[in-house]
Amino acid sequence: MSAEELAGLGRFAGPATLILSSLAEGSKHGYAITQDVEAFAGVKLQPGTLYGALTRLEHDGLIEALAGVGRRRPYGITPRGAQALAAQLSAQRHVASVGLGRLSTAATS
Amino acid sequence: MRWVRAAPRLVTQLAERHLLLFIVASVVFWTLLSPLALVWLVLHLIDRNRTLDNSPAAKQQRRVARLLRSYPADWRARYGDEMAALLHDTIAARRDGPRLGWNLAKEGIAARLAPPARRHVVAGACLGLCWLPLVPQGVVAAILKSIGTPTRSWFLALYVPNPYQWPLIATMVALGLAMLGTGITLARTPATPLPE
């Protein structure tokens, strides 16, 4: 599993990382995901964008639909989704550390 | 419905064969029938509105149904209920606005273009036809206008009044580029069939 799996989602790669990060904590339905993402990332996911990404993630087997209560259907992260998220976040952490390191070098020189 | 489809042909035949009757019928239509039809339409809409349930819950229900209409039927069959629940929550939290409608319209169109066959048809049409507005109606028309040739041929922009020629050429170029961009985007991005 590599970071390319999420990058391959094209315009949904950003929302997909946020959604998987939210689901890493436990299964959630659509509105709970938007609330959680806004709380930890400050990003307001619009319903259309959220379901566009959920459709892709479910199709790719990175999340799964669970039995819901009423009309709200919760989604949970699959083992494959957890691996893809870990790979993506590791790649982002590497980019962040390199970028921050270069910024501090430039500031001191 | 047959009458509706046949109407343009019948009107043309009437104008060609019975010009006087056509003129009388036109005057009657535009002075009498069309205002009556307009009044009937307004009364019908008022009556329809009165019979509708105007409680806030029913209004919200209708709004959610309208918002979901941009999605294809198979998508709504799979995700419609849960998306409706999300939209009710979103509207109840007053997080709705023009962006919500725009976002759903955009994603609905994307979902309609998700089936590979439909995607290929639209991509093929865009890539095959984008050259018409871009090259002959845009670039070539711009060159002909710049050099001031009297030839107008089939360049649409050269037939409109002078102040509108450059805006029309620019519109044609923009349309061609938009079609080209859409075609390339659709051809490059993989389609997402609905999960089993």
Image (cartoon, grey):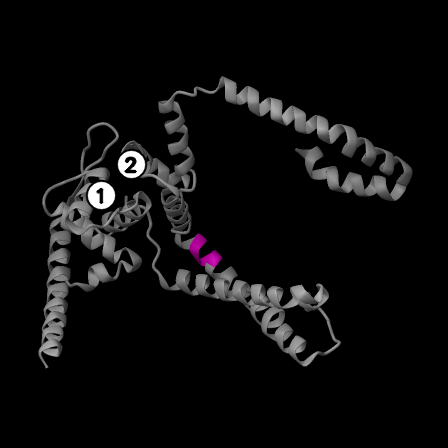
Kind of residue indicated by mark 2: Thr
Q: Position of residue B117 (x, y in %)?
A: 43, 54
* Highlighted range, magenta: B118-122
Q: Secondary structure at mark 1?
A: helix
Q: Quadrant of residue B132?
A: bottom right
What residue is shown at x 50% (from left), y 17% (from top)? Answer: B51
Same chain? Circles 2 and 1:
no
Please indicate whether residue B38 sits to the left or right of residue A92 in the image.
right
> Is A5 included in the stretch rendered in magenta?
no
Q: Secondary structure at mark 2?
A: helix
Q: Quadrant of residue B70?
A: top left
- Residue found farthest to the front: A108
Q: Position of residue B63 (x, y in %)?
A: 40, 32
Kind of residue indicated by mark 1: Thr
Mark 1 — on which chain does it sit?
Answer: A
Question: Residue A34 bears which disc, if any?
Answer: 1
- Is residue B77 visible from the viewing direction of this image? yes
Q: Are marks 2 and 1 in contact (CB under 8 Å)?
A: yes
Question: Residue B90 bears which disc, if any?
Answer: 2
* Nearest to the observer: residue B28 or residue B93: B93
Question: Residue B99 bears which disc, if any?
Answer: none
**Quadrant location of the C terminus of chain B in the rendered image:** top left
What residue is shown at x 33% (from left), y 49% (from top)? Answer: B193
* Nearest to the observer: residue B179 or residue A101: A101
Dot 2 crowding, Cα within 10 Å, few <14, some 14–19, many 20+: some
What residue is shown at x 36% (from left), y 37% (from top)? Answer: B76
The correct choice, above or below, for B86 with respect to B42 in the image is below
What residue is shown at x 66% (from left), y 64% (from top)? Answer: B164
